[in-house]
Amino acid sequence: MNELFRKAATKVSCLLGSPVAFIAATILVVFWAASGPYFGYSDTWQLVINTSTTIGTFLMLFVLQNSQNRDTKAINIKLDELLRAIEGARNRLVDLKDASDDDLDRLEVEFQRLARQEGQAIECRKALQGTKVPRRRERRNRIDIRKNKGEA
């Protein structure tokens, strides 16, 4: 049952997320609005669009939530693999989905602080570019090249 719903939800979300579906829905609404004078803008005429959109929205809620849950899970698995593969990465970040809101808030503050520090370092490098001071990695690469030339 799960697999059947997954396949159906994937197909429905792809189909209804397409430009063709948007154009079809727009044509349907225009047709409905244009038929108003014919039906005298009756309660039944209004009920048709209200009921149709309510049912469609209700069903799409489950389809979209399923798709979003699967996408989020896939992205998290990919990120977990990257964290495990990178030497020096903090493996405690792998299971963040189970962390409390307070833990997530603390980590967010920490990463914002790190981003600000990196941003300041980038600004310093930009300011120093005119003075021909190479970055640490560039210096390391130049030293490695010199060593390789000396060994050859």
Image (cartoon, rainbow, N blue to C red):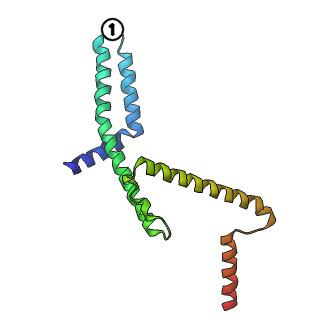
Identity of the residue drawn at 35% across and 44% down = 14
Can you say which quadrant of the picture contains the C terminus? Answer: bottom right
**Residue 37, position as x, y percentages in the image:** 36, 10
Q: Quadrant of residue 146?
A: bottom right
Residue behind mark 1: 40
**Nearest to the observer: residue 107 or residue 13:** 107
**Nearest to the observer: residue 95 or residue 149:** 95
Tell me if residue 152 can be seen: no
Point out the residue furthest to the left here.
Answer: 1
Tell me if residue 31 can be seen: yes
| Mark 1 neighbour density, 10 Å: few (under 14) some (14–19) many (20 or more) | few
Q: Tell me if residue 26 comes above or below residue 142 in the rendering.
A: above
Q: Quadrant of residue 31?
A: top left
The three-letter amino acid code for the residue at tag 1 is Gly
**Residue 114, position as x, y percentages in the image:** 58, 57
Asked whether, in this view, residue 150 is left or right of residue 37, the answer is right
Identity of the residue drawn at 35% across and 38% down = 16
Point out the residue furthest to the top here.
Answer: 40
Identity of the residue drawn at 59% across and 54% down = 113
Q: Tell me if residue 85 comes above or below residue 93 in the rendering.
A: below
Q: Quadrant of residue 61?
A: top left
**Residue 66, position as x, y percentages in the image:** 31, 45
SS under mark 1: loop
